[in-house]
Amino acid sequence: MAWRLFMKKTLTLIVTPSFPNPNSFKISPFSTSFLVTKLPKKLRKKRKKPDSPRTRPVQPDSVRIPHFESVLNRDSVFRFLIKSKEFLSKQPECILRLDDAGKLHRELGFPRGRKVIKSIQRHPLIFEVYRHTDNKMWLGFTEFAEQLLEDERSIMDSMEMDRVNKVRKLLMISKEKRIPLSKIYHNRLLFGIPEDFRDRVAKYPDYFRTVVENDGKRFLELVTWDPILAVSELQRQFIVNEDKVMKAFKFPVKYGKDLGLDENDMRKLNLLNTFPLVSPYSDGWKLDIWSLEAEKYRVGIVHEFLSLTLEKRASIHHIVEFKEEFSLTRRTYEMLKKQPRTFYLAGTEMNWAVFLKDAYDENGGLIDKDPQLIFNEKLFKFAQMQEGEVVSGAGEK
């Protein structure tokens, strides 16, 4: 009897009405409708980066000069090499514990959050990692790199007088004929000045004097003015090719075309808005800051500053650091943009560099190369080699 009742209930459950129940279409609590179907990463549309001074190029694509832009790319590629070489050279015995190196991303120039060992392995001819007697891993130079650094020191010694004159000229174009020692030190690589230059200046008391202010800040002051050095690079070029230099700069001066000037007067008026820059070795900082003459003075200052650098270029950070000494304004960027015949600005609006165009040939190579610059190019070449290539590469030293 119990078996029959069970079968009857089972058949009742199996036989369902032919008309569907509207409530049967309700979503069950186990529905998968909440899942979002994602496209594969390679099929997704790339988001366009927001336009900002950090990413916006200084030059539009139509007027960009690739070989100048490529120099900035090279700087980023060799950032770790340059900064680590400088940092290690100042350490006792030129070595550093690998654990400590991993915390010095800013000093050594590798990306924050990355392992330093990956950057080290990119330059096997320059850096090596070894286990010391304390059972710790240490970072140091290879024997090959040590020989290169010895060659660099020889170049520094042979170029000492040239570097002394560079520093003298920097002081001569500065407003007060004095510059904080820290600023020269921070920018020493820009001019090829040796790391120990603060000790070397003591050898030239007729040229330099170190002054310590009450707050402890140290300044390097000019002792004697040299009229032979007080000739700008632009003035030298003017003697060689007057017409070329006359066309190098243009300063807009508004005047009517119906002035009725004769040819001689018109030439004088055009001279006003072309070459005659105020010498960077004059007291141009005393001029009315917004006058045309003051702008010509500032353009001349930047031109002379760049001509003293190894690569005839400088970044915004180099220029801003000397803003007070060279009486530059916040409108330096706009000022240089108005002189495209002579200056080329590369990079982004927030991080740009300025080049002296006439210092480079049509292929982007520097016309006159300093021995230090030749060494740097050789170092970059070796830094890209692997250990097996050292024999063929060393023959070119």
Image: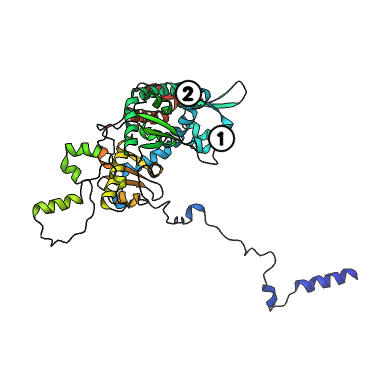
Dividing the image into 4 quarters, which one contains the N terminus?
bottom right
Q: Which mark is residue 25?
A: none
Q: Is residue 122 left or right of residue 292?
A: right
User: What amino acid type should be assigned to the residue bearing mark 1?
Assistant: Gly
Q: Where residue 304 sits: x, y (%)?
A: 29, 39
Choose between 77 and 262: the one closer to the eye. Answer: 262
Q: Mark 2 = which residue? A: 142
Query: In the displayed structure, would residue 40 be above or below residue 150?
Result: below
Query: In the displayed structure, would residue 345 be above or below residue 254?
Result: above
The residue shown at (36%, 24%) is 155
Query: In the displayed structure, would residue 17 be above or below residue 103?
Result: below
Q: Residue furthest bottom?
A: 19
User: What amino acid type should be assigned to the residue bearing mark 2?
Assistant: Thr
* Colouring convention used in this rendered image of the protein: rainbow
Q: Where residue 173 sits: x, y (%)?
A: 32, 39
State which tag comes first along the sequence, 1 or 2: 1
Give the quadrant of residue 162: top left
Dividing the image into 4 quarters, which one contains the C terminus?
top left
3D distance between C-alphas at marks 1 and 2: 19 Å
Choose between 176 and 144: the one closer to the eye. Answer: 176
Q: Is residue 263 left or right of residue 192?
A: left
Q: Where residue 294 sits: x, y (%)?
A: 29, 49
Q: Is residue 114 left or right of residue 34?
A: left
